Structure formats: C-alpha cells, structure tokens
Image: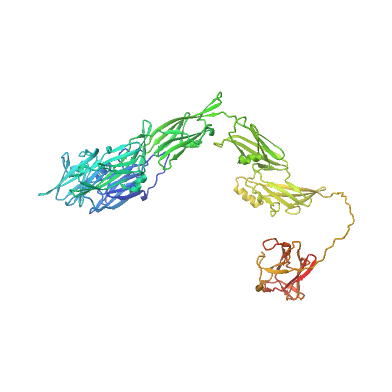
Amino acid sequence: IICQMPYRLFCLLMAAVGIQAQQTPSINDLNAECLGNVIRLSVAPLFEEVDAVFNDTQIINLTPGLATQCGFSFKFDPMGNAMFFASLQNCFSQNMDDKMFSLVMQFRLPGNHTTEDPVYRVGKTCSYTPWTSREILCDRNYMEVSVRKTLPDIQTIPKQPTGGPKAVASGYKMTVVFSPSKNVMNVDEVQRKGYAIANTPTRLVLRSPHNAEETYLQNVAGVPMRVLSTSTFFEQKWLVTRVDATAVCPTPEAVAFTPEVITWYMPKHIDPLFSSDAFTMLEVYMGIDAKRLDTEEMAARNYSVLVTEAHIIVEIPVGAVGGNFKSHIQDDQYFVTYTIEPMLELLWIEEVAHENTSYKVLFPITTPPMARPPQVHTPLDTVPEQAVFVLELGTFNLDVELLNITFPTMVLTVAECNARGFNVQEQRSPDNTLKTFRMEVPFSDPVVFKERRAEQGVTTFTLQLIYGLVIFPEYAPFSHSAVVDAVLLDIVPPSVTGNCDQENFHITVDYRNQEPFFVVLVGKRLLNHEFAQQYLTEGDTDFTITLPFSSPDAVFESVHSSVRSRLDVALLNPYNNMTIKYFSLACSFLKTLTECFSNGTMTALAVKVESAPGLNPGQLTLSDPACGPTYSDDRFAYFHFTVNSCGTTRKFINNVMLYENEISLPDELEVKLNATTSSEEEYQLKVSCYYVANITRTLAFLTRPRDNEPFAETGTGRLMVRMRLAQDASYNTFHQEEDYPVVTYLRQPLHFEVELTTSSDPKVALVLDHCWATLNEDRDSRPRWNLIINGCENPEDPYRVVFHPVEADARVRFPPHVKRFEAYMFSFAGDAVEPSGQVTKFTQQSLFFNFVCGNHPFKKN
C-alpha cells in the first residue's frame, strides 16, 4: 500500500510477505515528552491520521499545509515508526501566561465501511520558562521566530478545520512588511500566503515554510542559509509600534558527505541575526530527534562537535546509532541511504543590545544513495564433499524481503523452497540492523544440473537461480542473479560384506584403493579410536570389525532354540551425515539360556528383543510375580531359583520329570507399558529342565579301618551373656535399667536380643536351648510358660515366638554370637496363659533361658 499524499499523516499500513494479523493498539503505543520548546510524540506504526483538539470542542485534521503553518512536523523510519514534533507555540496549544502549554492530539486508526474509525486521544502539558529575548526554531518543514513584545494581547484563533490560524489585535491595525522585497501585507493576506502570525501574552510569533515566497537565500560564512525577515507594525490613532522578527535556518547544502562520515557546518556568527560582531556564545548542545545528548552518550555513538572561529562543525559516522538505513532501487540496482536528524541548540548574548537568543535546529540529513550490490557467497565452513550448495545472499537493510527464487525449470516461493528441503533462512547481524538470506540446495535435487566428465574423473554440479526481492513499504521489486558450481572427484562407493561364527559378527569394509572418506556407524555408535582399538583389524584397502553377538551395538531379534542377533552398519558422509552405504547382518547363535543343576536349581537368562523397545528387563518375573531377577541391566535379566518354587510346574513324561516356568511382565506393568507405546508389546519366554526319574549308577569305593576315633578336647572358660529388650524391631535402641518395668499392651510384640559379649572367636556360636517366663525372680517357680523348647518354638503356644536373622553391621561383629526373637506379651491366668487386651507390665527378671555354647550348656537369667 503506497500513500499518494506526500504528508498523509501516519499512512503506515505496511505491506508484508504473506498475510499479517492487524495489531490492536493501546495508549502505551503513544509516548509524549517535553523537550524544551518542543513536544515530541513517539508513535508505533498503527495510526493513519492525526487531529488537533482545540478548546476541547474543535477537531481539526492536520493536513500537510496546516501542519507546516501551525508548527507541526512528522518523521517516519523505514519500519513505519513515526515521531511527531510540535512547537510549544503551535496554533492549537492552550497557552497559560506563556509558562504552561497544554496540547491535546487525537490519533485515528483506519476503520471500515460499517464502523467508525477507532480514536485514541493523548494530551501533554509542558512548562517552559524563562523565555529568552528571541527564540528561533528550525524544523524540517518550517522556520519559527518568537520575540518579546510589550503590546496588549493579540489572540490566535484557528479558522474552521480546513483553514489556518487568524490573529486579532483589539484596538490595533496590524501590518507586516517583508524584507528585502518590502511587500506589505495585512494579517489576512499573511495567513492566506501560508505564513502564521500570532501574539501571546508576552511574545510575537511568526512562522513560515522554508520555501515561502518571502524567504531568501544568503551565504553566511560560506554556508547557504534560508532567511525570513519581517517588521510588524501595530497602528493606533496616534501611535505606531514596530516589532522586528528574523529567522535564519540552514539548508541541505550545509552538509558534506564521504562514504564514512557526515559533516554539518553551522555558521557561528549568523549575520542576519546580529546587530554587531560583539557577542558571547554561552551554550552549545547537540542532540538527536530534538533530545539533548550528554558527552558520554555522544562519545558512545562517536559523534563530535567542534567549535571553531567561524563554524560549529558536527561529525556523525554513517550508520551511527540514532539514524537508520533505507533501501532504494535504481535501474534494478540496490542502493541504500542513511538518514539521521541531529539537533543543534545554541544560546548567545549580544554585548551591545544585551539581548540573548535561543537558537534550535532540527536538521534531518539523508546521504546520497550508496551502491550496495548484493553478493552470493559460500560460508567458509562448507566444502563440496557435503554435496550441498550453501548460499548466503546479502547484505540488505531490514526493509528488504525475499519473495521467491527462480530456477531454470520452476519458480518457488520461500515456503515452497523450505517444503522442498532448501532450508531458506533469514539471518540478522548482531546489532539487528542488517540481514542476509541463507539457503541449502542438495546436489541431488533436480534443480541442480549435473555433468560427468569421465575422462577427467569428475562431476560438475551447477545451480542457476534468480532471487526475487522487494523493498517495503513501497513494495519496490528487484532481483539478483547467481550461478554457482562445484566439482567433485568421482568416488566408487565402498563395499561391505559380513559373516558370523559361533560367537561373533565379522564385518569387512573394502574402500578399493581410495582414502576412506566416510565415518562408520556401528549400531548407534560411531567407530572412534577406542572402539577401533578393541574390535577393528586393518588391511591394505579394507578393515574388518569383529563384534560379539551380545554386544550392546547389536540388537536381539528373537529367542527360540537359539538367539537371533542383528548388527547394522552404516557408512556416513562426515559433512552432512548422509548415508553412503548401509549393511545389515543377522545370524542365529546356538546359545543355551537355561541351565539345570543336579541339586534342583535352575538358571535362566532373558534378553530384551527389538520388538519390545520399551521393555525394562528388571521388571520381568517368573510365573510367581514375587520372583524377580537376581541380576538385570538394560538388556538382560538373570534368574536363579529352585524347581519347587516361583510357580514352577512339574509333569512326568515316561521316565523323565519336566519342570517348566515362564518369564514375563506382570499384567499391570504390561498394561502400563502398552499405554506409553504406540503398539502392544508382550514378552513371554518359557524355560524348562528335564530330570531322569529312575536311574541306576554303579560306584566303586574302598574302605579301610580308621586308626583312631575322633575326639573333642574338653576345656573350661568364662563366657558373658546378656539379654536385652529392644524398643522396636530394628534392634537399634534398647530399654535401660531405669525404664523397667516396661508398660505395654497384651499381645504386643516384645523384641529380645541375647548376645555373647566377651568372645572374639568367630567359630563360637550361641544357641538358645530353652526359654521360659515366670511371675517372679525364682526361675523354678510356678506358674511357668515355655517360649523356646530345644531351640524351637513351643508347639502349644498360641502365639509362637518368631526368630529374626542377624546380619553383621557396625555393632554386630560376629552374627553367630547374637540371637534375636520376638515374643508376644501375655498374662498368667492360673496355670494357663491368657492373652487379652489389658495393659500389663514386663519386668526385667521375669524371663529365663538356657543356652548352649559349643557342646556345653550354661544357664542364665
């Protein structure tokens, strides 16, 4: 979409490649700032028109002519962002005693045929004091001068929305005389000619377009300047008052360009503004877009300001921060311009008149078009052996887009190129100011022309293409042609063969008197140096990989009477990972996965097969889900069990006993596994053992009488044994002397530990022979109840004791020296034991036992 009116404000509906969703603006897209005697408003690229709101009632559309006449200007960057500048003394500000200025603007979005345009209103109030004797403002489309006066107020009242401002001085007749033409005009004539004149409570304001009829050029210190010189007469019956007002602004001829630097020359002594040569320059400031910069910011951007005897010289590097590049096409050639809007703000005082002048210039500068012919190049890290053309086209400004690419046989859009696998990408510079377009075209694609030269042993690959590009927002198309080629030596693909023995795969790769130009992928692992040292044997023109059938690089296909294992080998192009050669070898290996032992135990090895990729071998079980593997990893599960356990079945076949079991996943895990995979996975492996039921074997043996009978030497010694009541089944903490009697409920477990404390002989074992309970400290008293009889539980006890195993730990050095058992709390009812739910007490002296150490009985209470 191209705006036909040169200043159709905010006509920024930018076209783009494809269809873009329209953004919804918000008040956050408007940012207003007070910058001295200028209001700056930054506007996102969302709005089409802007209106001035006068006295909260009148809505005046700012046409280009009215904007110039009333002190408004607009700036756009190539991406459509805009800045709006307004003089504080514009036609529509609410002036409060020349100290406060309030401006309300209204921005309108493009609507449609059925709804009104969306409207956003923003206001800004700025203070500006004190004023100097004379204020001069040079903007891109107008020049303005404001001088101090002592006349009664002359109010500035805008005409209807299509007209400009009108000045009225009650009791005065106003006449404006322009110099040097001496043309005399009244206020109405001044307004009709496109000038503006207004009186505020303390000042007279005049404004003129730069190219107005009454302006003229004057060479000042070698710099062409545009001058507006006026005298305004206020006439009463017996009194005439004259107020002189002159504005001088630089022209584009004040700028010199090199490819690297912009130099702007501003006269230090602007002759038309001085009545004498005696003056003092009080302040010199530089800024960008009407905003001052401090010295640190200027240094960071490499700006410089030099004040000489005759000039103030501003130097700005081409491409510096604060400006922007714009793309252009001339005769299908690509050019760029660089635009920046520096500001100079000066303050001086004339020593004779003792009047000070504030001088501000907002000066947009655009370089002449600079040729930037695009280049197609290949990144340094690409080589022909990749078999891919990698092309980068650039560099361009951000307002350039790639539309399509024309090949000899077809035209493809960017989306179609990517769908074809060309991987077209836009890449930006680190500072986000430039872009290139990258593309990858495989040699194998039909758009690439191939020519084999057998006599030279090479193949030439040629790619011809035309890039179709466009510049936004004006949608200016242009193109760039390129032809690239690559030459590759013809390579005979290597051959791969293989075979198996009883244990291993043997893979041989023959590269036929050529240097190996590939990498080897064995299974899912690249053949590296460490791998090669272990499994590879090299020949003159080949090498052989020998790998066990159970290697992690192989996969198990199935398990029946044998194990079928497969090894996949691929030769890859190291530059693009494309497959040069693929080879797969599958063999059956006669391996016994089940072993049967004469002591009635079986072992079985389950392997993870390819058809169950989600299987965790550690979750496999025998027919009894409680029987899991004794060892497992991510490929194997090893089971060891007796033939009368783990759900093993037995049946007789003639004179043979057959024991069978099955290795599988528990039902709940199989359901869970299938829920997380795309296909149903089932794992079942039957294992079996055969035993001959009746067999006769002949054994030969010879006996002779013994010379003497074995005997045990009797000895004496002192052993210390203690019995303790543990606080729980962990046997980590025990009740102390002060804890007794211990209060507990009947039928609650009591955990006892008996320990041989003084012996360090690992061959000595402690055996609990008898243990009984009484009501008092007399071990022979009645009633009495036996807990352990001859080392076993009392068969008449309704709640028999439970023996607990003892493992070595930091406290228990010799497990045979310690015995642990669990008894349930009971009470005596006559001569019988009466378990009930009552509370009772256990005393330290109410339990007795006999124990045996070796063959010698001891008694201890």
Quadrant in which the N terminus appears:
top left
Q: Residue at x 71, y 38 (%)?
A: 501
Depth check: 776 or 421 in front?
A: 776
Q: In this rendering, does residue 73 appear at all?
A: yes
How is the model colour-coded? rainbow
- Residue 746 falls left or right of residue 132: right
Q: In this rendering, does residue 117 appear at all?
A: no
Question: Which residue appears farthest toward the front when viewing the image?
Answer: 309
Quadrant in which the C terminus appears:
bottom right
Q: Count the marks.
A: 0
- Residue 729 falls left or right of residue 464: right
Question: Which residue appears farthest toward the left when viewing the image?
Answer: 238
- Give the x, y percent position of residue 229: 19, 42
Q: Residue at x 14, y 50 (%)?
A: 171
Depth check: 727 or 399 in front?
A: 727
- Give the x, y percent position of residue 440: 49, 35
- Give the x, y percent position of residue 277: 20, 44
- Residue 740 falls left or right of residue 393: right
- Give the x, y percent position of residue 542: 64, 33
Depth check: 600 or 571 in front?
A: 571
Question: Which residue appears farthest toward the top when viewing the image?
Answer: 455
